[in-house]
Image (cartoon, rainbow, N blue to C red):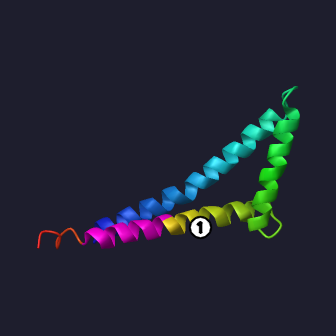
Amino acid sequence: MFNLFRSLLLTLLLSFTLPIILLVALLTGLGILGYLPWVDTIGQFGQSQLIQFLMIFGDGAMWPGLLIIAATCSLVAGFFDLFNFWLYGFPDNAKS
């Protein structure tokens, strides 16, 4: 039973931080791209579109939208982990 909680905690933690890291890296990359001479419009347009996308989920604010997306990914991954544990059963009872 301890393995279930350890696996669930690790799954929740990793699946919460991964979207945050990915979206912040994308925002940073688009921001850096906005300073380059020939692709500055692409970087600025991409960054503004990503910020507007995050503002949809955050009720008008970017950072709460990022946290809501991360929490949703974490919740879904936790459900998948629990379903996997339920599907294959407890390790002690798997032999019988």
Residue 78 placement (x, y as % from top left): 46, 67
Mark 1: secondary structure: helix
Q: Which residues are magenta?
A: 77-89
Q: Which residue is mark 1?
A: 72
Residue nearer the viewer, 77 or 9 = 77
Is 44 placed above or below 74 here? above
Residue 53 placement (x, y as % from top left): 77, 58
Q: Is residue 90 left or right of residue 26?
A: left
Residue 44, quarter of picture = top right
- Name which residue lies at 56% across and 52% down: 18
Is 29 placed above or below 71 here? above
* Quarter of the image with the N terminus in it: bottom left
* Quarter of the image with the C terminus in it: bottom left
The reply to whether the magenta stretch includes residue 84 is yes
Q: Residue furthest top?
A: 37
- Name which residue lies at 75% across and 59% down: 54
Is 1 placed above or below 27 here? below
